[in-house]
Amino acid sequence: MSFYALILAGGVGTRLWPMSRKERPKYLLDPLGSGSSLLQQAVARVEPLADSVWVMTSAATVAAVARQVPQAHVIAEPSARGTMPPLAACAALIASMDHDAVIGSFAADHVVRDEDAFVRAVSTAVQAAGDGSLVTIGITPTGPSSAFGYIKVALSANARRQLLSLDQSGSSAYPVQAFVEKPDAARAAAYMASGQYVWNAGIFVARADALLRHIHDLVPDLDPLTLKLGAQLSERMPRPGRGSRSMPLPGAAGVEAFSSPDIRRMWDALEPSVIDIALAEPLAEQGMVKTVPVSMGWSDVGDWAAVTALYAAAHGTDSGTYQHRTDPGEVHDDDSAAPVFRQNAEGTFVLGSHKPIAVVGIHDAAIVDMDDVLLVVSTKDAQQVKDIIRDVDRAGRSDLL
Amino acid sequence: MSFYALILAGGVGTRLWPMSRKERPKYLLDPLGSGSSLLQQAVARVEPLADSVWVMTSAATVAAVARQVPQAHVIAEPSARGTMPPLAACAALIASMDHDAVIGSFAADHVVRDEDAFVRAVSTAVQAAGDGSLVTIGITPTGPSSAFGYIKVALSANARRQLLSLDQSGSSAYPVQAFVEKPDAARAAAYMASGQYVWNAGIFVARADALLRHIHDLVPDLDPLTLKLGAQLSERMPRPGRGSRSMPLPGAAGVEAFSSPDIRRMWDALEPSVIDIALAEPLAEQGMVKTVPVSMGWSDVGDWAAVTALYAAAHGTDSGTYQHRTDPGEVHDDDSAAPVFRQNAEGTFVLGSHKPIAVVGIHDAAIVDMDDVLLVVSTKDAQQVKDIIRDVDRAGRSDLL
């Protein structure tokens, strides 16, 4: 059984503005100063598990993505259509060559501190997917967050209070009762207290053939696309042996398949849809979804509050540097970093480049000094950066977005 | 009786760093966006009162000062020696030509909102100086500040509680009992409650001949300098008629007097001294000092907290712009100002130039974005900017100071 990792590199990550821009989306950046971009980390994380790594991204970023992760097969989507169509397309391409293949779909802009736990959880999910289930990785909540969707585990009344004490090492899969949207604060606290909920990190694992069957049943609008892609690839390529672990699919085939005018037309005509709603929720109702709870130091690096906390935890300091490069392939360089001077400024993250920065009496904030724009934001209001984005756009300064 | 205004343009104003620098001291700048520098405002403020305006400054800034205030007589001090030697020197120069002259000495980097009250108070002081007293302007406190020295008014026990209800329009002079140093918070509150104290704004008015007499009595170290300066000017210049109101002293004479090697040698050999300690305190003990209490919207623009409050009061907004010019003669320009975007950022002052700035959830702070360095400081910790200056210096980055 081969495992194919699909990384969905989409979205700007606007709450990390002004580091993230339309032309330099979050996944191409390294906000935590690790030395590689979030996308490069995502690819490196699945490489030990996957026979082949695929990345789907927009036409505007495909060149930068290919430069950053030359080891992956990079496909440019004709247009942005959510997460469901890319997974369906990859399932069709892969299933046409490898009927025993298992596919995992992953975000390109999350971080995982405990990579061993990640590998264990995904391996468990791959095994659990053998019966045709859709398997998701469930993150054991570290607090009552309103920023994430939740997955409700189907546990007996007796077992409910014990989920948090259940194996969280990523070694076991549990049946899923339902997916629930981002809750308000009160509901999040109740979920946390119940011990029956885990965070939905957007990681889904399934057999390629099972995925196509579920898509046929639940998202039939995608059938023409998947059928056409499968047929197209079968026509053009010599078919490799099934289950051949050592033979990666040539990325050129996928890229070429997407360059066909028929495919592009079909793709552009699709309604956008996401895996969670189109597939995971209805399958959960049918008892066809499992989750692998795990504590693996996961974060979606969702805003500057997250960056501030993660950076301090990783580096034991509150200052990062970022060189604003024209080539997003080069993401980080401390060599020419300007100094940061602090007085009475605990909990304040400073991200600068060539210009010295002094901070006095400012706590729990992020200072993001890019060459063309400066942001100063308190961590408690980090989500309001989206309002600034709106104001910048209204002011006719889309050049800054 | 002629009135000569001496403006002492010295000091960097380090607590307004990074706007103020060694090469661009506070008085050459316009932190409040008024359209003219603090020095230009200081000169304009005394012009309606003075027959002649003199400015003493350092050799490093004399050219910039002369460009900013071409109407004043600008003298370069051979070295920085505090406020007492410049006043003594000017008294000697002026008295040698005009025995009835009254001199007032003023700071170059303060602001006064109510200029009518200022003119009234100084006029009252000039009249009160007629008997040979040293007269100071006393600012009616608006709060128990620890940032200023205080002047204790000599009032009878009955009158003490009434000082704050006395004439504060600058129309009356009162005898001074003592000058007191910057108090701690508890003492400042007691001063405020007593109603017997006013702030020392560093403005001193006296007859030139009385000044020379007091200096001879109390600061005899200055005698050689004052005698030499007076003699030198008398030798070189035709002496104008005494009390000639319409005849300004030629600035060239003062400049020339200070270029003499003898004067420079005498000056450099002086111990630094300040008017308050060398002259005002001992004269107060002798009952020879008066003060004119006045409420005139005075501020020493001492730090970014003061700028934040003053700017908002003057403009009804929290955002200023400042173009970092190589010529300090040009101080302000809103034309090419970059936008400031705010969300939930009341009480935060933003001073930028060409680069857009976004502020989210930051209150009661100042953001000062210069081309070569950025400062973010909370108003409550504005005094700690001096600690940053020290750190910047220790880090070998005196280029930023």
Image (cartoon, coloured by chain):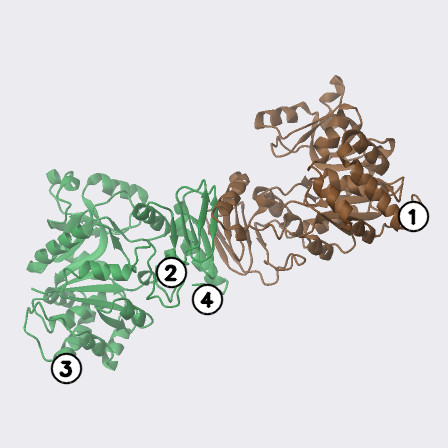
Chain colours: A brown, B green
Mark 3 surroundings within 10 Å by alpha-carbon count, few (fewer than 14), some (14 through 19), many (20 or more): few
Q: Amino acid at mark 4?
A: Asp
What is the chain letter for disc 1? A
Pointer 4: what residue?
B399
Residue pictured at 66% horizontal, 41% vertical: A299
Q: Secondary structure at mark 2?
A: loop
In three-dimensional space, the C-alpha distance between marks 1 and 2, rounded to whole angstroms, equals 72 Å
Q: Amino acid at mark 2?
A: Ser
Pointer 2: what residue?
B20
Left or right: B158 as drawn, with respect to B328: left
What is the chain letter for disc 4? B
Numbered badge on residue B236: 3
**2 and 4 marks in contact (CB < 8 Å):** no
- 3 or 2: tag closer to the N-terminus: 2
In three-dimensional space, the C-alpha distance between marks 1 and 4, rounded to whole angstroms, equals 67 Å
Q: How far across and how far down the image is residue A378, in percent?
A: 50, 42
| Front residue (pair B227, A209) | A209
